[in-house]
Amino acid sequence: MTDGIQVLQDVVVFGVAVEGEAVLVDVYGSPANVCGTVRFELPDPDLHIALDLLEHWSRSVTALTLIAHGSGVALQNDHAVFAAQIEAPAP
């Protein structure tokens, strides 16, 4: 943990459920062997986009990075982010 930011790499989504306007995401993994549920509150249009992505990550067992800061939590596919940066045309 650095400056109140916790970063856990190699986290995998193993369950996704919808509860009203919230998406509940069960995660596990990382060298710290975490296991828990993350709740994301999203408006309806974003809910379906996020749900599709989370279910894709779950089916493909995509290794993600979980970033937590205060009450905020994010899941990120670092491989996709870096691949897009490397493949982007030079300015």
Image: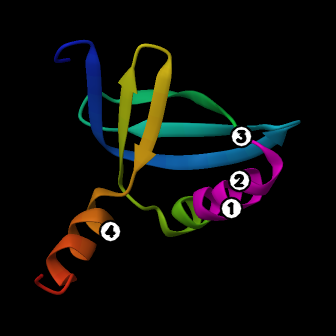
Residue 27 vertical position relative to residue 88 in the rendered view, above or below = above
x, y percent for residue 79:
27, 65
- Label 3, secondary structure: give it: loop
Instruction: Give the labeled residue for mark 2.
Output: 46
- Place of residue 66 in the rendered image (x, y in percent of width and height, measured from the top left): 38, 37
Q: Which residue is mark 1?
A: 49
| Alpha-carbon span between mark 3 and mark 4 | 22 Å
- Among numbered discs 1 and 3, the one appearing first in the sequence: 3
Q: State whether residue 60 is above or below residue 24.
A: below
Read off the magenta span: 43-55
Please name the residue that numbered disc 3 is placed on: 42
Give the residue displayed 53% in from the left and 48% down from the top.
Answer: 13
Spatial separation of the CA atoms under disc 1 and disc 2: 5 Å
Give the labeled residue for mark 4: 80
Seen in the image, is 39 located left or right of residue 80?
Answer: right
Q: Does 9 sit above or below residue 60?
A: above
